[in-house]
Image (tube, helix red, strand yellow):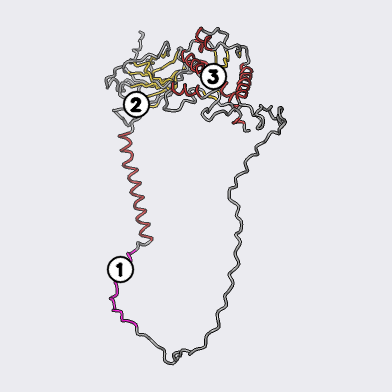
Amino acid sequence: MANSDRFSRSSTKHHDVFISYAQNDKPIADAVCAKLESRHIRCWIAPRDVAPGRNFPEEIIDGIAGCSVMVLIFSSHANNSPHVIRELTNAVNKSRIIVPFRIEDVLPSKSMEYLISVPHWLDAITPPLEKHIEVLAGNVERILLSEKEPEVCAKCKTPLSPNAKFCDACGSPVSVVPPPPPELSEPAVHPTPVPPPPPVEELPPPVAGPVPEEPSPEEPHIQPLPLIPETPPVPVAAPPATPSRNMKMLIGAGAVVILLITLVIVFPVITGSQMPFGNLGSGGAETQGPTPTATPIDYRSGNALVNTIVLAPGPTQTLPGESRLIVEADKNAITAEVNVLFEGGNAQGTVMDNRVILTRSDGTVIEGKLDFNRMLSEVVLQGTRGTDRLQVIVTLHSGSTFTIVDKLIPYPERMSTK
């Protein structure tokens, strides 16, 4: 039996284990999933196995319904997670086997204790963690193998021992189903016997009678043919004149010269009027503004245009629950660069994507990204000596988008000393 079929049970179940965990414990959950799948144990884990465009809660319910064992990564985060409590409640209602894998020495809450009141826990508190994950994989493998229905004797229906050749109850030999013969890529061709030719029937002898006279070769009988009226000949048009090889070469050379003239004269004019240049901040990509210029803009210079448009901040949104992301920003009084810094927050690690957008006072826009999985991540965007608008938009793993920063960044006045 192939390794991928060792734990096959029903065609409606496409995996064996559902991994339940809190978002802060995702690295350990991924390590458990990798170890189980290295043993050909099929796992369901979010958000990897959530189909694109599907409803997230419905996918969770389907994932629990399609498994036999739920592995719970138990920690203080999972102990206080309402999502983990809901997953455990659904697994208990569906009579799934729950294997708690405790990675912190904490007591379960009352709700958690009610749902996972099992006599045995797998503790992974002491290092190394890899050793405990190996023990967990062995226990899950034994649970799945014990769920497999044993083979029975075809004669007396008594369960057979593994690899038994004879039944322990009646002594009948265990029938082994031979593997199907390999399919031939091309069917065998057998020669078809050719039947013998039919016997030739003998003709009866000719009957004597008058012999017809044959015409004399000197006087052949010729039947006149009917006259066909003559048709006037159809005039054939002369073929068109084909240009000579020299003429083709002259035409091709003229086309190349016209193309070169167009590139030399027309192309710089077009690019000079439609392709503005600008300075890029660290990690930013500049987009075209409403007042394009043909030369790069030195935003540090006091001659650069500023405050040519009216900027106004929009409303911001708070993250769900008690989640927070702390982002600070300031502008350099010498270079006019805007420094955006992520200082932390309890929602660290929940961000799937983000956009840092700086709309400058001259109408041009520049963008960058922060790394919300790393403390003190920063991005530097080139601002102006006027008032710019800064927006920070984050997209969580749940698919929801929130604008957490939207404010104006003025240019700080440099203090002079006498």
Along the line of sight, which residue is nearer the eye, 306 or 88?
88
Q: Secondary structure at mark 1?
A: loop
Q: CA distance from mark 3 to mark 2?
A: 65 Å
Specify which label sits upstream in the sequence, 3 or 2: 3
Q: Between 278 and 311, which is closer to the camera in this rendering? A: 311
Q: SS class of the residue under badge 2?
A: loop
Q: Can residue 366 be spotted in the picture?
A: yes
Nearest to N terminus: mark 1 or mark 3 = 3
Q: What amino acid is at disc 3? A: Arg
The circle drawn on residue 96 is 3
Q: CA distance from mark 1 to mark 2?
A: 69 Å
Q: Disc 1 or 2, which lies upstream in sequence?
A: 1
Disc 1 to disc 3: CB gap under 8 Å: no
236 in the magenta segment: yes
Residue 335: tell me if it is visible.
Answer: no
Q: CA distance from mark 1 to mark 3?
A: 90 Å
Residue 308 image offset from top left, x and y in percent: 27, 22
Segment tinted magenta in the rendering: 225-241
